[in-house]
C-alpha cells in the first residue's frame, strides 16, 4: 500500500472522529496523514527497514497510529477504519471536497437526511430540506448549493488560460523567497496542455522549511492537504490543487524532466536509458559503477544534459507526449516548432464596429506595441444580429476608416480589411462575392447549426472551403472546451479540401477555443495545409492570448513555415486566394 492511500485512510479516520466529537485524536490523525503524504520514503520501505519502531519515528506518527499503519501494510486492511465506515456509510472523500462542509455538518446531514454522497447532498439541498434543519437556515443552504456548483464547474480540469497567470504569480512569489535559486512549474502546464489537472511546482532551495512555510501561507490557499520537509500539497480557493517539491541542484534537471511528463514520454525515455544498461529516475541518469550495486551519475543538473547523454535532441515540453518525438530526437530529425516570438501578424480581430470593445485605431496601436506588423480587422457579418454584424454597406464604410488608420499609423503597423463571415446552413456565405472580393482577408466561420449530422456538416464546411474568396476557416470545429462539443466533422476530408483549395485553417488562440486542437494541427501540418494562429481579440487586452495558440501549434508540431502569420506581410498576402 502506497503513502497516498494510507494518508487518505488516516485522514478519513480523523474526520470520522471529529464527527463523534472525540477530543485531540482527530488532529493527531490529520497530522499523521499529512506527514505520510508529505514523506519522501514510502511507509512500506520504512517498515521493511525498521519495523514498527521506524514507523513511530516518522514525525507526527505516535504508537497507536503506527500500529494502524502496520496493520494496513501487513493485511491491506484496517479493522478500526472498517468499523467506522460501517457506522457511517458515507462517501467522505467526495463530500469533504465541497467547500464549507466540515465533518460535523456531514454528520448532521447524514443523520437527519440520510445524505451519503454528493448526489444525495444535491437532492437534499434542492428539495429545501437542508434549510429546515436546526442551525442551518436558508443562508447556509444557499452557500452549500454554491459550493456544489463550484465543485461541478471544476470537478474536472482547468483551462490552461485560466490558471497560467495564477501559476506565474506563484512562481514569481516563490522565486522571490530567500534561499531559493530556481522555481519552475512542471506537469501539464509546462507541456501547455489545453486543460490542466493540477500544478506541479519544483524548487531548488537550501532552506526547504522556509519555502514550505511561504507556499502553504499564500493568500490563494484554502486548505493544506499535505505538508512535509520537501513536499507539500495545497488546494486553492478556486479548487485547483498545487504540489510543491524541493529538489537539489544536482537533481534539478532530472526532477524537471520527470515531473514535466508526460508519463508516457518518461516511460519511453527510461526505456532508452535501460537499453544502454543505464537507469533514469527523478534524481538523475546513472550508469553502473565498478562495484556491485553501485550507480554513478551521468547527468541530472539540467534536462538538456540528460537528453544529450542519451543521444537525443532536446525535446520541447509541448512535444513530450510519446507520439513519435523520441525516435525523431534520436535520429536528429525533430521538427523546429514555431517559437513564442515568431508571429508577425494577427488575422482575426474584432472591433467596436461589432462585438469588440475597442476602435480599429486602438486595436492597431496595441498590436503594434506588442510587436505585430499587421492585423486584419475581421468583424462579424450581418447574420450575427446580436453582434451587430456588418452588411456590405457598413463593411465598405469600415474600409474607409481602415484606410484612415493606415495613413495615420504608416510605418508602425498595417491594418488589413477582413471579415469573419458567417457560414450559412447550406455552406454558402453571409456576404455576396462583390463584398468579399474587396477584402484582404476573408475568414469564414460556423456560428450556427452546430449539431448537423457528420456528413451534412462536413459537406457544409467543404462548400465554404471551396469558395473562391475564403482564405481562412476560423475556429474550424467551433468547439468551446467543456461547454460545447466540436461540430461532428470528418477532419481528414476537411484537411484534404483545405489542401486542395489552398485554404488556411485557423488555430484560434482564445483559451476556451484552441481550435484547431493539437491533434488536428498535426494532421493539417502533415498534409501540408497552412495555418493561421489568431487571437480572436475582442479588446486590446486580448492580443497576449496569442501565446496559447502558439503553444497549441507547438503541441501540433507546426513549424514557422506552416504558419502564414509568422511570415512577413507581403509573403503572407500571397497565400490569400484573391
Ligand atoms: P494533469 O495534472 O492531469 O494535467 O497532468 P500531469 O501531466 O501534470 O500529471 P501529474 O500532475 O499527475 O504528474 C506530473 C508529472 O509527474 C507527470 O506528467 C509525469 C510525472 N509522473 C507522475 N506520476 C508518474 C509515474 O507514476 N511514473 C512516471 N514515469 N511519471 C510520473
Ligand atoms: Ca499536474
Ligand atoms: Ca500533480
Ligand atoms: Zn467566431
Image (tube, rainbow, N blue to C red):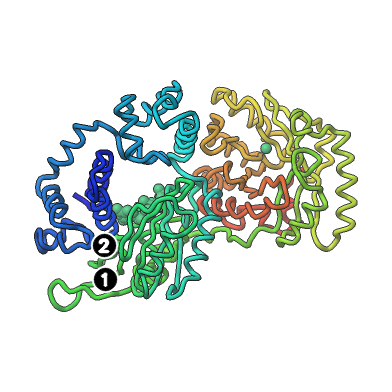
Q: Is residue 78 visible?
A: yes
Q: Which residue is mark 1?
A: 286
Q: Residue furthest front?
A: 134
Q: Is residue 265 visible?
A: no
Viewed as shown, does residue 515 lie left or right of 92?
right
Q: Position of residue 254 (x, y in %)?
A: 35, 67
Q: Position of residue 46 (x, y in %)?
A: 15, 61
In the rendered view, tell whether residue 569 sits above or below residue 298: above
Q: Which residue is mark 2?
A: 40
Quadrant placement of the C terminus: top right
In the rendered view, tell whether residue 354 sits above or below residue 362: above
Q: Residues within 10 Å of mark 1 (few under 14, many from 20)?
A: many
Viewed as shown, does residue 88 lie left or right of 217?
left
Q: Position of residue 66 (x, y in %)?
A: 14, 55
Mark sitting on residue 241? none
Viewed as shown, does residue 326 lie left or right of 158?
left
Seen at 13% across and 63% down, the residue is: 54
Q: Secondary structure at mark 2?
A: loop
Seen at 80% across and 49% down, the residue is: 416
Which numbered disc flags the more N-terminal residue, 2 or 1? 2
Q: How many marks?
A: 2
Q: Nearer the viewer, residue 328 or 235?
A: 235
Q: Position of residue 533 (x, y in %)?
A: 63, 50
Q: Residue furthest bottom?
A: 290
Separation of marks 2 and 1 at Cα, in angstroms: 20 Å
Amino acid at each position: 500500500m502506497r503513502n497516498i492511500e494510507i494518508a487518505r485512510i488516516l485522514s478519513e479516520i480523523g474526520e470520522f472522529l471529529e464527527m463523534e466529537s472525540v477530543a485531540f485524536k482527530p488532529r493527531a490523525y490529520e497530522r499523521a496523514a499529512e506527514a505520510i503524504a508529505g514523506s519522501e520514503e514510502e511507509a512500506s520501505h520504512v517498515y521493511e527497514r525498521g519495523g514498527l519502531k521506524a514507523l513511530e519515528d516518522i514525525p507526527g506518527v505516535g504508537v497507536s497510529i503506527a500500529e494502524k499503519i502496520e496493520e494496513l501494510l501487513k493485511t491491506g486492511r484496517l479493522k478500526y477504519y472498517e468499523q467506522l465506515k460501517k457506522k457511517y456509510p458515507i462517501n467522505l472523500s467526495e463530500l469533504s471536497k465541497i467547500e464549507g462542509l466540515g465533518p460535523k455538518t456531514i454528520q448532521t446531514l447524514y443523520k437527519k437526511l440520510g445524505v451519503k454522497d454528493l448526489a444525495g447532498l444535491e437532492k437534499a439541498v434542492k428539495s429545501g430540506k437542508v434549510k429546515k434543519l436546526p442551525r442551518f437556515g436558508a443562508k447556509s443552504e444557499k452557500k452549500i448549493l454554491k459550493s456544489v456548483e463550484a465543485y461541478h464547474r471544476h470537478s474536472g480540469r482547468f483551462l490552461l488560460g485560466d490558471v497560467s497567470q495564477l501559476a506565474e504569480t506563484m512562481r514569481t512569489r516563490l522565486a522571490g523567497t530567500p534561499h531559493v535559486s530556481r522555481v519552475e512549474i512542471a506537469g501539464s502546464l509546462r507541456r501547455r496542455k489545453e486543460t490542466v489537472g493540477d500544478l506541479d511546482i519544483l524548487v531548488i532551495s537550501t532552506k526547504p522549511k522556509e519555502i514550505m512555510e511561504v507556499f502553504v501561507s499564500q493568500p490563494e490557499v484554502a486548505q493544506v492537504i499535505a505538508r512535509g520537509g520537501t513536499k507539500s500539497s495545497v488546494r486553492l480557493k478556486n479548487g485547483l490543487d498545487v504540489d510543491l517539491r524541493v529538489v537539489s541542484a544536482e537533481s534539478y534537471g532530472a526532477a524537471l524532466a520527470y515531473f514535466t511528463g508526460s508519463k508516457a514520454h518518461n516511460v519511453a525515455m527510461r526505456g532508452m536509458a535501460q537499453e544502454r544498461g543505464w537507469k533514469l529516475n527523478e534524481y538523475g541518469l546513472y550508469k553502473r559503477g565498478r562495484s556491485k550495486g553501485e550507480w554513478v551519475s551521468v547527468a541530472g543538473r539540467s534536462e538538456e544534459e540528460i537528453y544529450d547523454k542519451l543521444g537525443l535532441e532536446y525535446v520541447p515540453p509541448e512535444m513530450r507526449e510519446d507520439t513519435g518525438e523520441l525516435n525523431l530526437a534520436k535520429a536528429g530529425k525533430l521538427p523546429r516548432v514555431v517559437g513564442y516570438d515568431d508571429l508577425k501578424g494577427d488575422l482575426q480581430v474584432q472591433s467596436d464596429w461589432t462585438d469588440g470593445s475597442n476602435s480599429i485605431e486602438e486595436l492597431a496601436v496595441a498590436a503594434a506595441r506588442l510587436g505585430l506588423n499587421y492585423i486584419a480587422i475581421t468583424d462579424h457579418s450581418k447574420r450575427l444580429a446580436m453582434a451587430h454584424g456588418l452588411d456590405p454597406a457598413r463593411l465598405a464604410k469600415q474600409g474607409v476608416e481602415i484606410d484612415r488608420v493606415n495613413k495615420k499609423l504608416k510605418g508602425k503597423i498595417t491594418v488589413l480589411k477582413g471579415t469573419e463571415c458567417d457560414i450559412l446552413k447550406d455552406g454558402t456565405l453571409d456576404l455576396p462575392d462583390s463584398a468579399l472580393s474587396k477584402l484582404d482577408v476573408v475568414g469564414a466561420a460556423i456560428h450556427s447549426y452546430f449539431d448537423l449530422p457528420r456528413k451534412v456538416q462536413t459537406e457544409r464546411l467543404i462548400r465554404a472551403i471551396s469558395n473562391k474568396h475564403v482564405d481562412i476557416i476560423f475556429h474550424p470545429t467551433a468547439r468551446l472546451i467543456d461547454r460545447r462539443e466540436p461540430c461532428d466533422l470528418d477532419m481528414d476530408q476537411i484537411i484534404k479540401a483545405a489542401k486542395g483549395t489552398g485554404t488556411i485553417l485557423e488555430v484560434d488562440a482564445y483559451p476556451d477555443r484552441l481550435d484547431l486542437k493539437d491533434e488536428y494541427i498535426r494532421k493539417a501540418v502533415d498534409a501540408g495545409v497552412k495555418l493561421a494562429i489568431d487571437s480572436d481579440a475582442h479588446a486590446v487586452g486580448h492580443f497576449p492570448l496569442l501565446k496559447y495558440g502558439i503553444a497549441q501549434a507547438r503541441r501540433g508540431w507546426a513549424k514557422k513555415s506552416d504558419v502564414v502569420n509568422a511570415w512577413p506581410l507581403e509573403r503572407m498576402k500571397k497565400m490569400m486566394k484573391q
